[in-house]
Image (tube, rainbow, N blue to C red):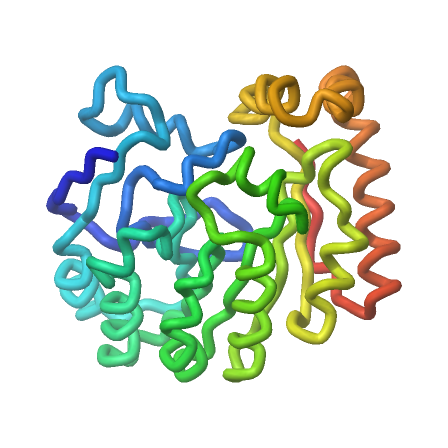
Amino acid sequence: MPVHEVMCKSALTKSNLPAADYALNPYVGCSHSCRYCYASFMRRFTKHGGEKWGSFVDVRVNMPTILARELRTPRKGTVLFGSVTDCYQPLEQKYQLTRKCLEVLGQRKSGLLPGVLTKSELITRDADLLSSLGAEAGLTITSLEESVSRAFEPGASLPKQRIEALRQLHEAGVATYVFIGPILPGLTNMREILKAVKGSVGAAMAEALNLRSGGLNCEEVYQEHFPEQLKEFRAYCADPRNYATRLREEFEEACQENDITMAGFFLH
């Protein structure tokens, strides 16, 4: 996969997400290569021409320096790491941009509360920093089945590794949550996922598959790997609003059964 070291002009950007005031993305592009990725629209803002989203990564090597400069001006609120592309994707092992940016937040005493959402067990490396900063950390889990994860999220940590990461973060004193999303029709068992993380998370969120952005790419994955569930996927495509409403009800019931706070369910 082509990797390009680039320079950024800014680190913090205003966020339109309800749970974050700012966003911070040390990487553009992601080697997790999730087939349902909603962030493919970002390609038009890069210089990669016809390269397929998920086939390249730009590394913003100067981001910790830029962040330190921006924090000379006091800021308040929350900052979400990896709002567009995963900030703990494999390249973070080498570049450590996420860790360095977390360190800057601590050194500058900025008042910004960090949050992270990832599919990578690498986040446990920074459990000490996340705990000391009062951060909130979430792990995305779409299925407990390794076959599903490998088909839809080929570069991400396996589900069992993410579950273990949640356990370790929780034991380190980090506020944790599980993000079940996108819900893959016929493949995502919300009840089983919540049961698996019970005791390691304080809250859960879920998201219906976004057919306007990335979701339709999933049909060929169903056809190739999960033909038995293709009918269920097409049922969702035919009536996503009503289907997702039923999913929300199921998710709420599952959270209650496992005594986990339902922090949000996102429709499209």
Seen in the picture, residue 227 relative to 178 is either above or below; the reply is above
Q: Quadrant of residue 177?
A: bottom right
x and y, in percent, of residue 191 in the image? 81, 54
The residue at the point 38 percent across, 69 percent down is 76
x and y, in percent, of residue 122 in the image? 40, 63
Of the pair 227 and 90, the residue shown nearer to us? 227
Seen in the picture, residue 169 relative to 267 is either above or below; the reply is below
Seen in the picture, residue 23 relative to 57 is either above or below; the reply is below
Tell me the quarter of the image containing the N terminus. Answer: top left
Q: Quadrant of residue 131?
A: bottom left
x and y, in percent, of residue 181 in the image? 63, 44
In screen coordinates, is 175 left or right of 92? right
Residue 23 appears in view: no
Of the pair 20 and 198, the residue shown nearer to us? 198
The residue at the point 77 percent across, 27 percent down is 241
The residue at the point 61 percent across, 46 percent down is 146
Of the pair 253 and 93, the residue shown nearer to us? 93
Residue 94 appears in view: yes
In screen coordinates, is 180 left or right of 47? right
Q: Quadrant of residue 50?
A: top left
